[in-house]
Image (cartoon, helix red, strand yellow):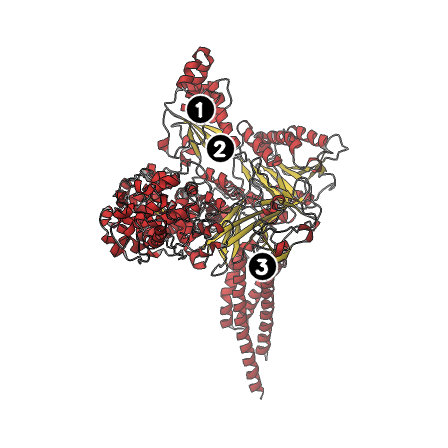
Amino acid sequence: MGTENPNPRNYPLRPAATPFASPQSSTPFASQQSSMPFASQRSSTPFLSSGPVVGSEAPVFRPGPPAASNFQAPPFSGRPLVGTEAPAFRPPPSSRPSEVVRPPPPPSSGGPPTSGFQSFPNPPMPSAGQVPPPHISLTGRPVIAPPTRPPPGPASIFSQPQPPLVSMGSPPQSLKTGQPNPNIPPPADQHFSAPRPSSQPSSPPTGTSYAAGRGIYPGYANMQPNSVSQDPPMQPASFQLQQGGYGPPLQSASFPLQQGGYAPRAPPTSLLAQQRGYAPIPPVSTPSGIYPGNQFQQHGIAPPVAAQQGLAEDFSSLSLGSIPGSFDAGLDITALPRPLDGDVEPKSFSDMYQMNCKSRFLRLTTSGIPNSQSLASRWHLPIGTVVCPLAETPPGEEVPIVNFATGIIRCRRCRTYVNPYVTFTDNGRKWRCNICSLLNDVPSDYFAQVDASGRRVDLDQRPELIKGSVEFIAPAEYMVRPPMPPLYFFLIDVSISAVKSGMLEVMAQTIRSCLDNLPGSTRTQICFITYDSTIHFYNMKSSLPQPQMMVISDLDDVFVPLPDDLLVNLSESRSVVEAFLDSLPSMFQENMNVESAFGPALKAAFLVMSQLGGKLLIFQNTLPSLGAGHLKLRGDDIRIYGTDKEHTIRLPEDSFYKQMAADFTKYQIAVNVYAFSDKYTDIASLGTLAKYTGGQVYYYPNFQASIHKDKLKHELSRDLTRETAWEAVMRIRCGKGVRFTSYHGNFMLRSTDLLALPAVDCDKAYAAQLSLEETLLTTPTVYFQVALLYTSSSGERRIRVHTAAAPVVADLGEMYRLADTGAMISLLSRLAIEKTLSSKLEEARNAIQHRIVKALREYRNLYAVQHRLSGRMIYPESLKFLPLYGLALCKSLPLRGGYSDVQLDERSAAAYTMMALPVKSLLELLYPNLVRVDEYLVKVSLLHSCFLCWSMIWYVSYLLPMSPQTEEFDIKKRLPLTVESLDTRGLYIFDDGFRFVVWFGKALSPDITKNLVGEYFATDFSKVSLSQRDNYLSRKIMEILNQYRKSDPSYFQLCHLVRQGDQPREGFFLLTSLVEDQTGGANGYADWMSLLYRQVQQNA
Amino acid sequence: MNEVLAWLLFFFILIALLVMIVFQLMCLADLEFDYINPYDSASRINKVVLPEFITQGVLCFLFLVTGHWFMSLLCVPYLYYNVKLYNQRQHLVDVTEIFNLLNWEKKERLFKLGYIILLLFMCLFWMIYNALEDDGHSI
């Protein structure tokens, strides 16, 4: 097998076409045979070693790029194939595992692999196959297959006609059919040569034969059908054949997606069918996959499973009526792919490179880096990465801390930090940088012997050489000044609206309650400034019993009184600070001032903070109206929408804000803006401060303490107490030939590739786009290294380093296969939001649509020729949710509709938030959770009441095997976001990570409503909040809500109650968020898919 | 003789413009290669932006009043572009976005540079032409 034909070329997609023809008939067999090999290979592949793959080589891979050579993709372990082969493998998915089993086969090669086959063979055949495992199956066919047979040979193939193939007649279908017929399996052998296959089966050529056979077959087989075949080919054949063939192979599962369509068996069906079909576990095939040995063999015949899988994996398709205008009929709404499992990170990638950092830290939009600019230009989606350097880690997976006594080991030339992918040579005296290939000396105190396999003997004690993520303690040369203490500066608006809304009180209480938990223990510094039309400073010197207030009313020339006593050490002045916070709300109780001297206050804060840097929290209630940076009401101009000037309202109006933001970053000050106004506050301008300083914007429109109290409390305390990295800079290095060209998120660039981040925490992610610098990449792997240099709250300078490797691929199909929808959408949304800052909303939405269409069209061109796909939309399995997320993105707050759809402030605030959101939260925001809870509540309460009746308990537990105590509500049972999911008798929870909407159906049992909202049962829900009441149902629902809140604590979801038919409230809170429905001129999911489909067809 | 002096004046004004633009380009190049930080780079560039605009406006005006309407006309597109930028308040370099706009800023200034060099050659040509003509007359 190994040998397979060495044709390594993977690329060859082309052949495909031909394949069909000939293949068909032959295919089946071929595939089988070939399949074997493949199968084996593939199977193996999964494993790291995967030696299988190509016979021997496989093993090699593993991490290294080594063997790879043949394949482009070496990196992947088994996968090598990358390009072509890829398909075959489908590695990633579950399949592998199964395969794993088989691995061994190699030698015999033929034997084992077989498993794959199942398809045809399967059913019937088993017998044959089984026996001598491998051989058998193979056997038959083997017969000699004239190795060569040129692919085209098809003709001959046809000849076979006969039996099995029968169906073949019609090629395509035939395939499938063929399989069914399987019985015949034998045919395969001949493939070309002889038609007859059937016979053979029995005779299993011996092992040898196999080998030969395989070799041979492959030839054929390969060609056609299986792309699988070892041959490089993947080519064409792959798909086709596969489809036909088997169906089912193991993987079936993998495909799941497919909408359903299993159907497996249906023999005759056309390819299409198959495509979707796959899986079908059905028959025979299935087993094989999974069960290693035996089964396969049995199937013997079975076509190369792998192949099939390959196909399956290759793309998913959706049936859309092919007749113009009739698509409605052809589109099955329920079959559309939906991300009901939330964010699914592609597994294959991390499996391939086990030493990569976890995907929570770094995700690539596609893990296959194109090897040439021409290939990159055919990939119409962005290539890039989303980095969340400080993502929260689950217990047990903390990032190890490494302290080098004598300097951190870095490459002399490119400054890369030592990482698991560097190689030690010269008996451990030198190490080769994986990014620039420079040979560096190993410092004497870092020296360790290298064993025969090239591993350092002390590997176990060196986390930096085994883990993708480590944290180095930085020595003094990484400091420009002594590490700064954590510093919190509060700039608080105390004008009348702040007092009236209750914001001041909630805020003061929250800060006071967080004083104990501020990071930094005794080093923490704190300062307060309040302002209305004047600026108030507070002297908090520890020797004072009470804070002293100083008022400055000269707004044109702000100066700081007592510069030394404003900023104080929290632990020393604790009592003064507490006294201040206690008296703050009452101090301004009578304040009737409506003005806001925001700009001058900001300058004052800057003057106080510029020595140290730190975090500036701004609580703004009104539009800044006095002094520098005063703003105008400009958001109400409806006429500006749809004109060329539309975007200007989303940009800061006054350059003062950009200038201040730049100065803040320069002095390591991060700004978080909390805005509360019920009127226009120009978040677009205020948010600029947060955007360029690595901060974030919290917006509470129309803040009322009674309603929003919990939300503000939770979010402010999280902001104050989460682990924060101070005065940080981040750089992403990557191997030769590629370069990061643009960065997207909340930060400021300090040089072309250095991100200045005055404060970073786990809720911030940054995206970057890559481009190829060289026309051709010659390395098999590209490495990325994210380095974040920061000061921890404890006052240590540290460097957090995340390293990842990604294979270079030569085949577009492989790029699609390795794509990651989550990262892709994250990057796309940032690009789209940036686009709204320079053009109309409409254009930004169109840009998303165009990108998706172009990507799907390119994908279609890749495969359409080989399959009869008219009337079907095909998309890569890995990106099956891309269209839906794209639609959701177009309907998200920053991009939705026009003037009347979303308030300008809300739009801007959402845009700033989405620019910083990590992938997971973003996906949840775009496609929120919708779950039905009434059934669960009723069930549990029933159980509960029964439970109370002791006598009943036995009966209950008999009826319903779960006791109320043990039953956990499954928050994963998500529903599609469409009105059709809402049953009038139901109670639903909608959760987008920022708010809950609890929807009460019209026909919901009044008992439930009464239990949940008590005396407000019949009143208007707009003033009612859901709080815990003294009954079981209420406690249960609160439990569910808390479960959601705990799953993502970065924001607090405030609960809104909505009754069905209660307009406009229902529309506002829920209906506009149901992204699959047609709302306000935007497409519904089905229409959107048909639209994409039509556009993909154009100029295809 | 006056003609020659006038062209000489234009020549020096053009040289001044050239210097200002080259200076801006150098700042941008330094920034790109990380020799200076964006704050310094932006403030240096912004310091010469207005002088550049004014000088160019003066030049255009002088061409007009000295009766060199053709040269004046050649200057008008440049002037119009500057005025447009100024009115949109986009004439200054934005520190916060300087890296994203780097390529555009460079392209814009290279274009201006080419423009100025073209004018410079025409100016030289006219100066020499006039000088020779004067010579001819004096002889």
In the image, B137: left or right of A1019? right
Measured Cα–Cα span from mark 2 to mark 3: 43 Å
Q: Residue placed farthest to the bottom in the image?
A: B139
* Amino acid type at image mark 3: Glu
Q: Residue at x 62, y 40 (%)?
A: A724
- Residue A1020, image x, y percentages: 44, 24
Asked if disc 1 and disc 2 are in contact, CB closer than 8 Å, the reply is no
**Amino acid type, mark 1:** Asp
Residue A425: give x, y in percent of width and height.
Answer: 60, 55
Element assignment for label 3: helix
Q: Chain of mark 3?
A: B
Q: Are marks 1 and 2 on the same chain?
A: yes
- Circle 1/circle 3 CB separation < 8 Å: no
Report how many numbered discs are placed on residues in the image. 3
Inspect the image, locate mark 2, and give the three-letter code of the amino acid beneath it: Arg
Q: Chain of mark 2?
A: A
Q: Nearer the viewer, mark 1 or mark 2?
A: 2
Q: Position of residue A34 (x, y in %)?
A: 35, 50
**Above or below — where is A972 with respect to B109?**
above
In depth, the one of A769 and B138 nearer the eye is A769
Instruction: Give the CA separation, mark 1 to mark 3.
Output: 60 Å
Q: Earlier in the sequence, mark 1 or mark 2?
A: 2
Q: Residue A542 versus residue A504: which sits nearer the camera?
A: A542
Mark drawn on residue A1020: 1
Q: Quadrant of the C terminus of chain A?
A: bottom left
Q: Is residue B89 visible?
A: no
Residue to which mark 3 is pinned: B32
In the picture, measured across the screen, residue B133 lies left or right of residue A999, that is right
- Residue labelled with disc 2: A995
Q: Name the outermost residue toward the top.
A: A951
